Image (cartoon, rainbow, N blue to C red):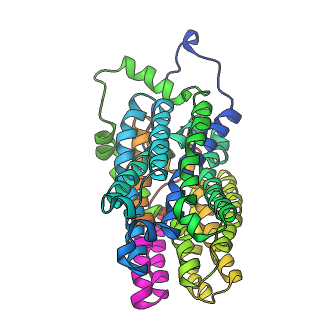
């Protein structure tokens, strides 16, 4: 069990320096809209990696190898995410949550639009996948710095007794982003009508559309003030000597166990989410032969169910605690890992829908409380860095590796091997959660 870390009560800034407080409603909207846009950019890559990138950027590799190569570029972002958490966490802990989040939004939007404009391998040869990997890496840096900052906006504004509920709003971003991603690809597919037109230019529309979304996100994020907890921490720092300028080194020295256990906790939630949103999109179309439009339509429905499950998980965490809700989800994931692929292998749209909805629902129940639980583990002075690093290391373990290994495991050993891999990750999450302490009643 983690030891409780004593925290000094931050001294609020003088009354003359206080600005008109930002309402919780505005914070909730800002955190939700911002993460929706960032994750929309991140997820449309996963959808494209499943549907079109093997053909456009890896045509010489063949079907199976092309999918593996495509998901390898997808996984590159997860390597970049911990680095993004460290870089942006450094500035977020020193300069503020708001300024850093504006920067991550710019970086994500620019990278995504550039992917939408990128020539394919047919036009520029091997340079196309190389540039694609670099842009995907930039996306990973941005989303690595996004999560912790967006959640700290909610956690550091919210009252203690409702922290789990308000921390759900940035957690809803992935659900809304998955629905938006599936919708834009579906509309593009329906409007263009033919595989030729969709492969030629239709897939680019969701990426270029991101530019407009980024402008909306910037407007909303600029409308909120810095969190009062961070402002108070800054006031305390101004009076302290010496003043640390290395949040990453500080958190590594002070709370290394919390970082590693946070990563372990996130292993199966990340695996379930990215298997559901990316790998199952490819498995539904290529593995069991469902129509692309059917898979995309079911993705929209599953995303809405995911949003409801995320809300439920966050709401419950204020009443029974974060750990019990996360543990219940991880135990359910352990059982579902052995059910999922036998269900999918029935090859029907109904079975695919149940598999997709079940996978994302289990993820959502855990993901709701995580938004408050991980930031609560770390001290204010390096909370952005600590929570972001642990979260994104979990993304590397659970989000990058399973979709990358799944096609080969299925080809060599059958789909049940993927279920065994997911069960191992569920066991890691259960043990990690048990080793962490409940801090839901402690002030931020």
Q: Where is residue 188 in the image (x, y as percent from the top left)?
A: 64, 60
Magenta span includes 417: yes
Q: Where is residue 38 in the image (x, y as percent from the top left)?
A: 53, 47
Compared with residue 31, is residue 222 higher up or lower down, i.e. above or below?
A: above
Residue at (54, 64) in percent of width and height? 47
**Rendered image quadrant of residue 73:** bottom left
Compared with residue 97, is residue 188 higher up or lower down, i.e. above or below?
A: below
Compared with residue 49, is residue 351 higher up or lower down, i.e. above or below?
A: below
Residue nearer the viewer, 93 or 306:
306
Residue nearer the viewer, 442 or 267:
267
Residue nearer the viewer, 167 or 270:
270
- Is residue 205 visible in the rendered structure shown here? yes
Residue nearer the viewer, 435 or 53:
53
- Is residue 2 visible in the rendered structure shown here? no
Q: What stretch is highlighted in magenta?
A: 401-430
Q: Position of residue 193 (x, y in %)?
A: 67, 67
**Rendered image quadrant of residue 431:** bottom left
Residue at (54, 58) in percent of width and height? 201
* Total count of labels: 0
Magenta span includes 204: no
Q: Where is residue 278 in the image (x, y as percent from the top left)?
A: 52, 67
Residue at (44, 78) in percent of width and height? 406
Magenta stretch, main secondary structure, is helix
Q: In which quarter of the image is the N terminus?
A: bottom left
- Going by the image, does 159 lie left or right of 250? right
């Amino acid at each position: 069990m983690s030891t409780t870390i004593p925290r000094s009560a931050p001294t609020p800034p003088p009354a003359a320096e206080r600005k008109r407080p930002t309402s919780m409603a505005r914070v909730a909207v800002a955190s939700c809209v911002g993460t929706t846009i960032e994750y929309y950019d991140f997820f449309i890559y996963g959808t494209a990696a499943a549907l079109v990138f093997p053909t456009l950027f890896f045509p010489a590799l063949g079907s199976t190898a092309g999918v593996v190569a495509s998901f390898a570029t997808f996984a590159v972002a997860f390597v970049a995410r911990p680095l993004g958490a460290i870089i942006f966490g450094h500035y977020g802990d020193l300069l503020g949550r708001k300024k850093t989040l504006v920067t991550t939004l710019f970086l994500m939007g620019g990278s995504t639009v550039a992917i939408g404009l990128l020539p394919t391998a047919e036009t520029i040869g091997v340079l196309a996948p190389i540039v694609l990997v670099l842009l995907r890496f930039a996306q990973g840096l941005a989303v690595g710095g996004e999560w912790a900052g967006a959640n700290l906006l909610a956690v550091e504004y919210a009252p203690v007794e409702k922290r789990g509920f308000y921390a759900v709003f940035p957690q809803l971003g992935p659900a809304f982003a998955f629905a938006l991603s599936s919708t834009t690809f579906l509309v593009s597919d329906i409007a263009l009508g033919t595989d030729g037109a969709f492969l030629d230019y239709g897939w680019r529309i969701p990426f270029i559309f991101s530019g407009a979304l980024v402008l909306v996100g910037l407007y909303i994020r600029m409308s909120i003030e810095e969190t009062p907890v961070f402002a108070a921490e800054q006031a305390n720092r101004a009076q302290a000597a010496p003043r640390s300028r290395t949040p990453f080194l500080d958190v590594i020295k002070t709370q290394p166990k919390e970082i590693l256990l946070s990563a372990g906790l996130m292993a199966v939630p990340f695996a379930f989410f990215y298997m559901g949103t990316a790998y199952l999109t490819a498995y539904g179309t290529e593995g069991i032969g469902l129509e692309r439009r059917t898979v995309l339509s079911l993705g929209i429905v599953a995303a809405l169910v995911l949003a409801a499950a995320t809300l439920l998980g966050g709401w419950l965490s204020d009443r029974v605690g974060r750990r019990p809700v996360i543990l219940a989800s991880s135990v359910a994931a352990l059982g579902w890992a052995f059910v999922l692929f036998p269900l999918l292998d029935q090859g029907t749209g109904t079975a695919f829908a149940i598999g997709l909805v079940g996978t994302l629902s289990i993820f959502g129940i855990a993901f709701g409380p995580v938004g408050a639980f991980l930031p609560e583990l770390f001290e204010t002075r390096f909370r952005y860095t600590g929570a972001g690093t642990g979260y994104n290391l979990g993304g590397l373990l659970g989000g990058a590796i399973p979709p990358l290994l799944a096609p080969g495991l299925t080809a060599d050993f059958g789909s049940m091997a993927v279920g065994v891999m997911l069960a191992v990750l569920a066991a890691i999450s259960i043990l990690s959660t048990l080793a962490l302490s409940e801090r839901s009643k402690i002030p931020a």
